[in-house]
Image: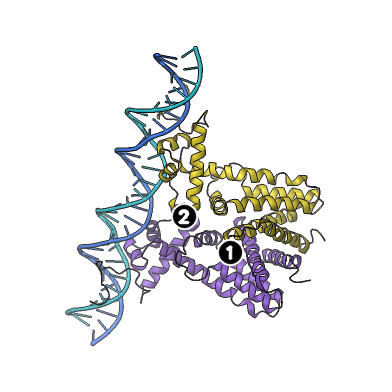
Chain colours: A purple, B yellow, C blue, D cyan
DNA sequence: CGAAAATATGAGTGAAAGCTCACAAACGCT
DNA sequence: AGCGTTTGTGAGCTTTCACTCATATTTTCG
C-alpha cells in the first residue's frame, strides 16, 4: 500500500542502489558510451547496450525508465566535472590565467573522448524538453562572463555577447581539433588561448 | 535486355526526370528539410517525408534508393552554393576583404536556415562512407589556406593548421549565434571577422 | 487516336528496437 | 537457517519504419 500506487507493480528508475547494483548502472553507462563511440546513434539501442554491459535488458530498465534517461545520465557523468571546472576559473588571479585554466579544462575534456563528447553535445540540444540543469554552454559562457567582469573588462549586453562568442570559439576549435585527431593538448591550448586573446583585443575589451 | 540486368526489375534512382518529376523531387527534398527542422532526426522518416511532400512513398523510392540518399541530396542542395562562394574568396584584392567575403557567405548561409544547417552539418560526418565530394569543412579550410598564401601569410603545416582553426572559429561562432536566435547578420559578421583577425595577429601570421 | 514510356500509387512485408512482466537468483538480517 | 528485499533474467509483445511491387494514371509522340 506504500508507493506502488497505480496499475503497474513495477516502479522502475529505482533510485541508485545499495550494493552491486551500482556496478550494474556504471556498466550500463560505460557500455552506452562505447557503443556511441564506435557505432554512433545508428547502432545505439537498448538491447545492444544491455548486451555490451553484460546485463539483461530487464536490469537496464530497472534503473532507467527509457532510453533517453540513459543518454541523460551519461551526459551528466561526462559533463559534470567540466562544469565544475568552469565554475572555478573565476578564482584565477588574472584574466589570462583564468582563460588558460578554462581552455585547459575544456581541451582535456574533449581530447579524452572526442567522439563521445561530440555526440553528447549534439544530443544535449534535443534532450532538455524539461529545462533540467544548465546546459554546458550556459555554464561556460557564464563563467567567462564572470571572469571578464571580475577583471574589469566589459559589462552588460556587450560582455554577454563576448562571453558567448568566446565560448563558441573554444568549442569550435577544440571540437574540430578532436575530429581531426589532434592529440597535442598543449599546442591546442596555446592556439585557443591566442584566439581568445585576439578576439578580446580586436573587440577593444582588453588591450595587450 | 538493356540496363535492368540483375534480379530486380525495378531500377530506382531514376536519374532526374524530364517533366513534372523534377517538381516531385524538389517537393521531397523540401519536405525532408521541413521535417528535419521541426522534428529533428527523431521524426525524420521516409513515410512522413512522402506525406509532407504530397507524394506517395512509392514515388519517393523511384528517385531515391534509400533514406540516406535523400539526406545526401538535401545536403548537396544546401551546401553547394556555399562551397562555390568559398572557392571564390581567393579572388579578393586583400586578405581582409577575402575574410569578409568568406564570413559574409557563411553567415548568410547559416542564418537562413540555422536548424537545418546544424543538423546537416552533423549528419555529414556520418554519411561519407564513400568519400564523395569534399566535405564543406575541407573546402572552407582550403579556401582560407589559399587566401593566406596568396597574400603572403604563412606556408606549410602552420598555415594549414591556421586555416583549420580559422574555419573552426567561423563555424563555432556562427553556429552558436544561430542557435541563440541571432538575426543581425552584419553585427555577427563584424564579430567573426574580428575574431579571425585577432587570431592571425596573435599567431604572428599578420600584423595589423 | 493509340500505344509505349514515364510517372504515380499505397497496401503490405519484414526487420529492428523499445519496453514489459512473470519468474529466478543473490543478499541482508535476525 | 529462514525470510523478506533487492537485484537480475530473457522470451516476447508491440510499434515504428524502411522499402517493395503489382497496378493505375499521365505524358509523349508518331
Q: Nearer the viewer, residue A207 or A117?
A: A207
Q: Is residue B32 left or right of residue A22?
A: right
Crowding near pointer 2: few (<14 within 10 Å), some, many (20+)?
few
Q: Nearer the viewer, residue A181 or B202?
A: B202
Q: Position of residue A190 (x, y in %)?
A: 70, 66
Residue A7 drawn above or below residue D16: below
Give SS at disc 2: helix
Crowding near pointer 1: few (<14 within 10 Å), some, many (20+)?
many
Residue A42 drawn above or below residue A110: above
Give SS at disc 1: helix
Label 1 and label 2: CA atoms lie apart by 19 Å
Identify the residue shown where x is 75% and y is 46%: B90
Q: Nearer the viewer, residue B127 or D10?
A: B127
In which quadrant of the rendered image does the C terminus of chain A lie? bottom right
Pointer 1 indicates a residue of which chain? Answer: A
Identify the residue shown where x is 52% and y is 33%: B22
Q: Which residue is mark 1?
A: A110
Q: Position of residue B204 (x, y in %)?
A: 79, 61
Residue B22 drawn above or below residue C24: above
Q: Is residue C26 left or right of residue B82?
A: left
Q: Position of residue B112 (x, y in %)?
A: 60, 51
Q: Which residue is mark 2?
A: A41
Q: Is residue A63 left or right of residue A119?
A: left
Rendering quarter of residue A144: bottom right
Note whether residue A164 is visible. Answer: yes
Q: Position of residue B70 (x, y in %)?
A: 50, 42
Amino acid at each position: 500500500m506504500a508507493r506502488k500506487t497505480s496499475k503497474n507493480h513495477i516502479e522502475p528508475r529505482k533510485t541508485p542502489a545499495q550494493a552491486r547494483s551500482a556496478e550494474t548502472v556504471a556498466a550500463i553507462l560505460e557500455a552506452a558510451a562505447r557503443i556511441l563511440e564506435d557505432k554512433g546513434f545508428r547502432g545505439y539501442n537498448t538491447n545492444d547496450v544491455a548486451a555490451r554491459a553484460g546485463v539483461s535488458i530487464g536490469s537496464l530498465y530497472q534503473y532507467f525508465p527509457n532510453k533517453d534517461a540513459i543518454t541523460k545520465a551519461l551526459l551528466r557523468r561526462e559533463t559534470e566535472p567540466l562544469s565544475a571546472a568552469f565554475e572555478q576559473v573565476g578564482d584565477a588571479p588574472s584574466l589570462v590565467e583564468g582563460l588558460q585554466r578554462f581552455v585547459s579544462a575544456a581541451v582535456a575534456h574533449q581530447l579524452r573522448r572526442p567522439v563521445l563528447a561530440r555526440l553528447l553535445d549534439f544530443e544535449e540540444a534535443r534532450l532538455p524538453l524539461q529545462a533540467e540543469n544548465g546546459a554546458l554552454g550556459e555554464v561556460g559562457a557564464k563563467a567567462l562572463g564572470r571572469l571578464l567582469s571580475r577583471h574589469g573588462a566589459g559589462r552588460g549586453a556587450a560582455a554577454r555577447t563576448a562571453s558567448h562568442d568566446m565560448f563558441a570559439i573554444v568549442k569550435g576549435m577544440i571540437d574540430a581539433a578532436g575530429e581531426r585527431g589532434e592529440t597535442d593538448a598543449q599546442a591546442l591550448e596555446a592556439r585557443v588561448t591566442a584566439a581568445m586573446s585576439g578576439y578580446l583585443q580586436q573587440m577593444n575589451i582588453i588591450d595587450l
